[in-house]
Image (cartoon, rainbow, N blue to C red):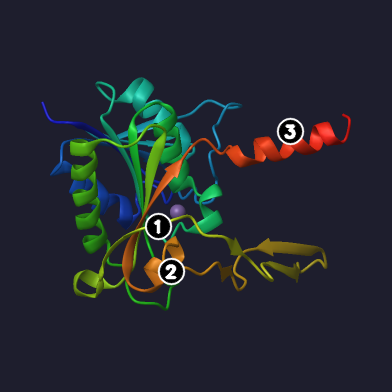
């Protein structure tokens, strides 16, 4: 019996990124795909609780769900797979998941759900530049995903930790290596656009803008900009330990 691997994403079951990832995982273990029936990017860790979910069987080991990436992980583990998976892989997302953006990411949220369930989980994203940029090279990204999956099946991961992997779209020859990185800070400017409908109503469209990034050799964004694969270990405990003392000192000082 090979290792059981659950493959999901947020770009939808028909996206080229998940096809490449599913194929790559078939070389690593017994791969099963459970993915949203359409693109669900930027849905974060949303779980569908107020309507039933419809599952469509696409093949012996593939299903689509009319829900979120988190729904797919929950249904995959709880209902669809023959047994509990040894590994969950999410992606390969079209576009990076870097810095604070990971809090919106459906791709990373699927890996968060897996980690919460106590299963080693990985998120893969390929830096792809818009419709006019170079064609996204999912083949190279998938080979890297395969290598990372084998590493994790062999070594495990630290407690409560997932790997957020971002791959530059530089082709096999263009990638300089791997950097183990920190999640950087990002500030979007001018990301809300205003437009009028034909009936004169004002609408707002969130997206784009000119993001500013925190610099540093150990940062996720800087690694991919310099042609390295960025691997960030993400810890699910969001507690700022030092801030507990900060709070305690000031709270008591206030006489509260
Ligand atoms: Mn996406």
Residue 45 in the image, given as x and y percentages of width and height: 53, 39
Residue 50 located left or right of residue 98: right
Identify the image quadrant of the C terminus. Answer: top right
Circles 1 and 3 in contact, beta carbons < 8 Å:
no
- Which residue is tagged 2? 222
Q: Taking the image as drawn, is residue 240 in sight?
A: no
Image-quarter location of ligand 1: bottom left
Q: Residue at x 49, y 39 (%)?
A: 68
- Which residue is tagged 3? 248
Residue 228 located left or right of residue 108: left
Q: Residue at x 24, y 75 (%)?
A: 174
User: How many discs appear?
Assistant: 3
Residue 177 in the image, given as x and y percentages of width and height: 25, 66
Q: Nearer the viewer, residue 202 or 43?
A: 43
Circles 1 and 2 in contact, beta carbons < 8 Å:
yes
Q: Check disc 1: other Cα within 10 Å, few if <14, some if 14-19, many if 20+.
A: many
Q: Secondary structure at mark 3?
A: helix
Q: Which sits earlier in the primary sequence, circle 1 or circle 2?
A: 1
- The span from disc 1 to disc 3 (Cα, nearest Å) is 31 Å
Which is closer to the viewer, label 1 or label 3? Answer: 3
Which is closer to the viewer, label 3 or label 2? Answer: 3
Q: Which sits earlier in the primary sequence, circle 3 or circle 2?
A: 2
- The span from disc 1 to disc 2 (Cα, nearest Å) is 9 Å
């Amino acid at each position: 019996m090979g290792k059981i691997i659950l493959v999901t994403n947020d770009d939808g079951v028909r996206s080229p990124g998940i096809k490449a990832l599913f194929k790559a995982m078939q070389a690593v273990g017994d791969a099963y795909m459970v993915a949203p029936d359409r693109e669900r990017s930027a849905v974060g860790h949303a779980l569908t609780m107020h309507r039933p979910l419809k599952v469509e069987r696409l093949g012996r080991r593939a299903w689509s769900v009319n829900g979120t990436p988190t729904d797919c992980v929950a249904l995959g583990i709880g209902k669809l797979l023959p047994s509990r998976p040894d590994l969950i892989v999410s992606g390969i997302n079209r576009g990076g998941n870097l810095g604070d953006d990971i809090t919106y990411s459906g791709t990373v949220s699927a890996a968060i759900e897996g980690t919460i369930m106590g299963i080693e989980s990985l998120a893969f994203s390929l830096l792809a530049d818009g419709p006019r940029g170079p064609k996204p090279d999912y083949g190279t990204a998938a080979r890297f995903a395969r290598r990372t999956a084998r590493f994790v099946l062999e070594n495990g991961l630290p407690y409560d930790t997932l790997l957020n992997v971002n791959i530059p779209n530089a082709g096999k020859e263009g990638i300089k290596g791997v950097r183990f990185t920190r999640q950087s800070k990002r500030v979007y400017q001018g990301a809300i656009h205003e437009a009028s409908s034909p009936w004169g109503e004002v609408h707002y469209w969130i997206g784009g803008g000119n993001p500013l990034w925190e610099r540093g050799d150990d940062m996720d964004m800087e690694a991919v900009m310099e042609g390295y694969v960025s691997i960030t270990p993400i810890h699910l405990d969001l507690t700022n330990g030092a801030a507990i003392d900060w709070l305690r000192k000031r709270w008591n000082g206030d006489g509260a």
